[in-house]
Image: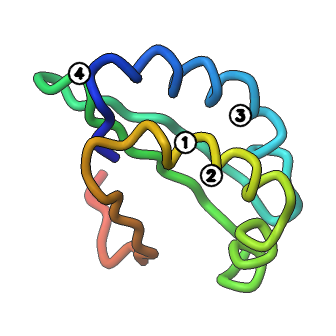
């Protein structure tokens, strides 16, 4: 997610306000917020869900709708979202 530079604080405040509710939504087992090391207005969330159905239930929830309706006003560029699966992990 790439935010307008002057909207980063607003995004962070909103994320911190809702992060526990998102993390405790049924089916969510892990939630992280990452920030680009050099471009301080670029963020991504990383989460683990039971399955696609659980993620879609979150996406259809009032919680997501309220968080997203606020967040999308802050973007500088269109956000990108995708689901991924682990192929390999090296210890």
Query: Compared with residue 23, is residue 27 higher up or lower down, i.e. above or below?
Result: below
Secondary structure at numbered mark 3: helix
Secondary structure at numbered mark 1: helix
Number of labels in the image equals 4
- The x, y position of residue 86, in whole percent, is 39, 73
**Who is closer to the viewer here, 79 or 37?**
79
Q: Name the residue under label 1.
A: 71
Query: Compared with residue 40, is residue 86 higher up or lower down, i.e. above or below?
Result: below
Q: Mark 3 points at which residue?
A: 19
- The x, y position of residue 41, in whole percent, is 27, 27
Q: Name the residue under label 4.
A: 40
Quarter of image, res 89 = bottom left
Q: State the separation of the CA atoms marked 4 and 3.
A: 20 Å
Residue located at (88% from left, 61% from top): 26
Tell whether label 1 touches label 3 (CB within 8 Å).
no
Residue located at (41% from left, 67% from top): 81
Quarter of image, res 56 = bottom right
Q: State the separation of the CA atoms marked 1 and 4.
A: 16 Å
Q: State the separation of the CA atoms marked 3 and 1.
A: 13 Å
Query: Compared with residue 64, is residue 6 higher up or lower down, i.e. above or below?
Result: above
Question: Along the polypeptide, which appears first: circle 2 or circle 4?
Answer: 4
Secondary structure at numbered mark 4: loop
Residue located at (40% from left, 23% from top): 7
Q: In the image, which is nearer the foreground, mark 2 or mark 4?
A: 2
Question: Along the polypeptide, which appears first: circle 1 or circle 4?
Answer: 4
- The x, y position of residue 43, in whole percent, is 35, 37
Question: Along the polypeptide, which appears first: circle 3 or circle 1?
Answer: 3
Q: State the separation of the CA atoms marked 1 and 2.
A: 5 Å
Q: State the separation of the CA atoms marked 3 and 2.
A: 13 Å
Tell whether label 2 touches label 1 (CB within 8 Å).
yes
Q: In the image, which is nearer the foreground, mark 1 or mark 4?
A: 1
Q: In this view, does 30 lie to the left or right of 37?
A: right
């Amino acid at each position: 997610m790439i935010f307008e530079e002057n909207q980063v604080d607003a995004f962070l405040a909103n994320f911190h306000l809702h992060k526990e509710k998102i993390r405790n939504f049924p089916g969510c087992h892990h939630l992280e917020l990452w920030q680009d090391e050099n471009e301080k207005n670029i963020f991504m969330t990383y989460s683990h869900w039971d399955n696609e159905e659980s993620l879609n239930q979150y996406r259809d929830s009032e919680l997501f709708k309220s968080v997203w309706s606020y967040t999308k006003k802050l973007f500088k560029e269109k956000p990108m979202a995708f689901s991924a699966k682990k192929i390999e992990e090296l210890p």
